[in-house]
Image: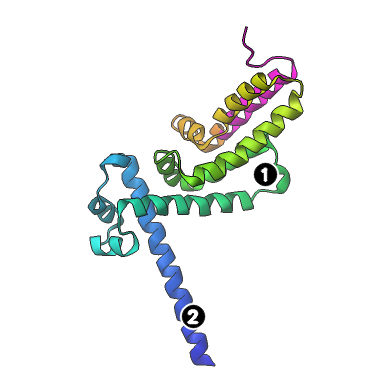
Amino acid sequence: MSGTSSRVADSTLRDRQRDLTRRLLIDAFAHVILRDGIHDISMQAVADEAGCSLRTLYRYFPSREALVTGLDDEMRSFLTSCLDRLPPDVRDDLVEFAERVPVLLDQRHDLVRAWVSTDPTSELRGFVSGHVRALVEAAVDRTAPSLSPDERARAVAGIRLIATSRTWVSLTEHLSAEDAAVTMGWIIRTLLADLANGGGPRAD
């Protein structure tokens, strides 16, 4: 029985070490993206940044495309953990969501910044934007239910532009994560208040 327990423990430890190595390699990839840009990355540069051999890198990620997929996977895991830490009332309220999630994103600032600069059509981006779009649509419909379809579409598009990781990355070039979150919340509240008062993106 003790032999079985030992083998299980060894297997668990190996899995944890493998997961940690993958995460360290993805973090190195993120740093290289931010330094060199996504289009000029070599596998050797990632291995050098990670402090490992090229052979080790290829064992985990056989190509640059595999690294991009790994970056998406790491972001999915990270974003899921961020959402899981939010109470349901925060997760389902646009302004609360916009003010709380950016602070959580700052825990892996470089990962998020690197991910934002990669392929904008990834499946993960659809997962994230789908949740945000639902929050924005619900907030707009609740605030200004009498908007015409065109007015609603403009309002949703404008507010969605603010409630994105790309906006957060831009703001944190100049502000702390906390100040960026406050700013995003303020902009969204201001736009919703304008809609509630009869304003909005109307064509003349």
Dot 1 corresponds to which residue? 91
Dot 2 corresponds to which residue? 9
The amino acid beneath tag 1 is Arg
Crowding at mark 2 (Cα within 10 Å: few <14, some 14-19, many 20+): few
Residue 184 appears in view: yes
* Residue 199 image offset from top left, x and y in percent: 69, 14
Q: How many marks?
A: 2
Q: Would you say 23 lies left or right of 53 here?
A: right
Q: Earlier in the sequence, mark 2 or mark 1?
A: 2
The amino acid beneath tag 2 is Ala
Q: Majority secondary structure of the magenta segment?
A: helix
* Residue 120 image offset from top left, x and y in percent: 44, 38
Q: Are marks 2 and 1 in contact (CB under 8 Å)?
A: no
| SS assignment at label 2 | helix
| Above or below for 156 versus 92 | above
| Above or below for 58 versus 82 | below
What stretch of residues is rendered in magenta?
Answer: 181-204
**In the displayed image of the protein, which residue is found farthest to the top?**
204
Viewer-nearest residue: 161 or 186: 161
| SS assignment at label 1 | helix
Mark number, residue 17: none
Residue 201 sits inside the magenta stretch: yes
Kindly indicate the quadrant of the structure image that contains residue 10. bottom left
Q: Residue at x 56, y 39 (%)?
A: 129
